[in-house]
Image (cartoon, grey):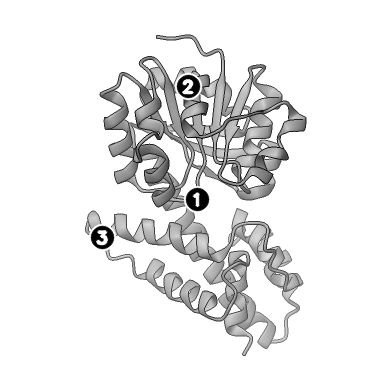
Amino acid sequence: MSAINSLGFIGVGTMGGRMCLNLAGKSGLPVVAYDVDADRLAALKDAGVAVGSDVADVTRRADLVFMCLPGEPQVEAVAFEPGGLVDSVRAGQIVVDMTTATVRVARELASQLEAREVEFADAPVAKGVPSAADGTLSIMVGATEDLFDRIRPYLETMGTEISLCGGVGTGQVLKLMNNMMIFQTVSALAEALAIGTRAGVDGKRLFEVLAHGSADSFALRRHGSWMAKGEYPDDLFPTTYSLKDLRYALDLAEQVGVDAKGARLVESRFVEAIERGFGDRYSPVIYKLFED
C-alpha cells in the first residue's frame, strides 16, 4: 500500500473545477490538474493548483488521481487511448472516477487498472453546481471497504454525504437512480405548476405550500424555485447532460429487465426541449413545453 503524498485532477469543468478547488484548499497536499480547456486550468492557478501538460503528466505526478468528465465517451478517451491514463499508471496508485458514466465503463476501467496493480473507485456526485462550489456534494462510492476508508478524507474535501454503495460500479448505479428520480420529479413539478397556475394559483405560492407537505423534496425546493421564477440558467446543469444521464439509466433498466415507462416519458420531454433550442438550459426548462 503506497502512501498518498500528491493528488491529481483530470477534468476541471463546471463541476470538476469547483471540486478541484476544494480538494486543493482543504487536503493539505499538492494538486496537479489537466483539462483540454487551458482557460479552465488558468483559473485554478491562484489557488495553487499546478498545471499538467496532459493526462499522462498528471498520472505520473500524482499518487491519487481524480477524474470528473462529461460522460462515458470522455472517460473512454482519457482512460484507454494510447498515452492515456491506463498506459501511464504505476503500481500502487489509486484512480477515482467522479464522472457520471455507465456501470460498464467503470468495471472495464477497474479491470484494466487492476491488471496494473492500481486500485479504482467510481464516485459520482450529486446535488449540483452550488454544492460543488461549497463542498457539500453527495458522493456515491463503489469500492472495497479498505479503499473507501483511504480515499474518504479526500472525498470529504468535496462533499458532506459520502456513501459506500458496494463494489465497483455500484456508485454509478446509485447515481443514475438518483438522477432518474430527480428528473422524473422535475417533470412532475412542471405538470403541477401548469395545472396549478391555470387553476388560479400563483406559481411561487404553489411550491411554497407544497414544500410544507408530503410533496416536499430537494428537487421541489431547488428545481421548483427556478421553474416558478421562469429562470433557467445556462451555467448549472444543461438539459443535454440531463438527457445523457437519463439515457444511461434507461440503458441500465433495459439490461436488468425493468420497463421504466416514467423515465421514458421524461426522456421524450428532454428531447423536445432540446429540439426547441433549450438544451443549454437547466432541466426545469421543460416547463416551457407547457406554456403554449
- The secondary element bearing badge 3 is classed as helix
Where residue 94 sits, quadrant-wise, is top left
Residue 217 in sight from this viewpoint? no
| Residue depicted at x 64% and y 43% | 38
Camera-side residue of 2 and 167:
2
Of labels 1 and 3, earlier in sequence is: 1
Camera-side residue of 61 and 164:
61
| Residue depicted at x 52% and y 20% | 61
The answer to whether 82 appears left or right of 287 in the picture is: left
Camera-side residue of 134 and 65:
65
What kind of residue is marked 1?
Pro
User: Where is residue 20 drawn, in percent x and y?
Assistant: 63, 34
The answer to whether 103 appears left or right of 148 in the picture is: left
- Which residue lies under the disc numbered 1? 70
For residue 266, above or below residue 44? below
The answer to whether 226 appears left or right of 114 in the picture is: right
The dot on residue 254 is 3
Query: Which numbered mark, 1 or 3, is in the foreground of this view?
Result: 1
Structural crowding at the residue carrying mark 2, measured as other residues with C-alpha within 10 Å and reported as few (<14), some (14–19) or many (≥20) = some
The reply to whether the C-beta atoms of the residues labelled 1 and 2 are less than 8 Å apart is no
Query: Which numbered mark, 1 or 2, is in the foreground of this view?
Result: 2
Where residue 22 sits, quadrant-wise, is top right
The reply to whether the C-beta atoms of the residues labelled 1 and 3 are less than 8 Å apart is no
What kind of residue is marked 2?
Arg
- The secondary element bearing badge 2 is classed as helix
Of labels 1 and 2, earlier in sequence is: 2
- Which residue lies under the disc numbered 2? 60
| Residue depicted at x 34% and y 39% | 80
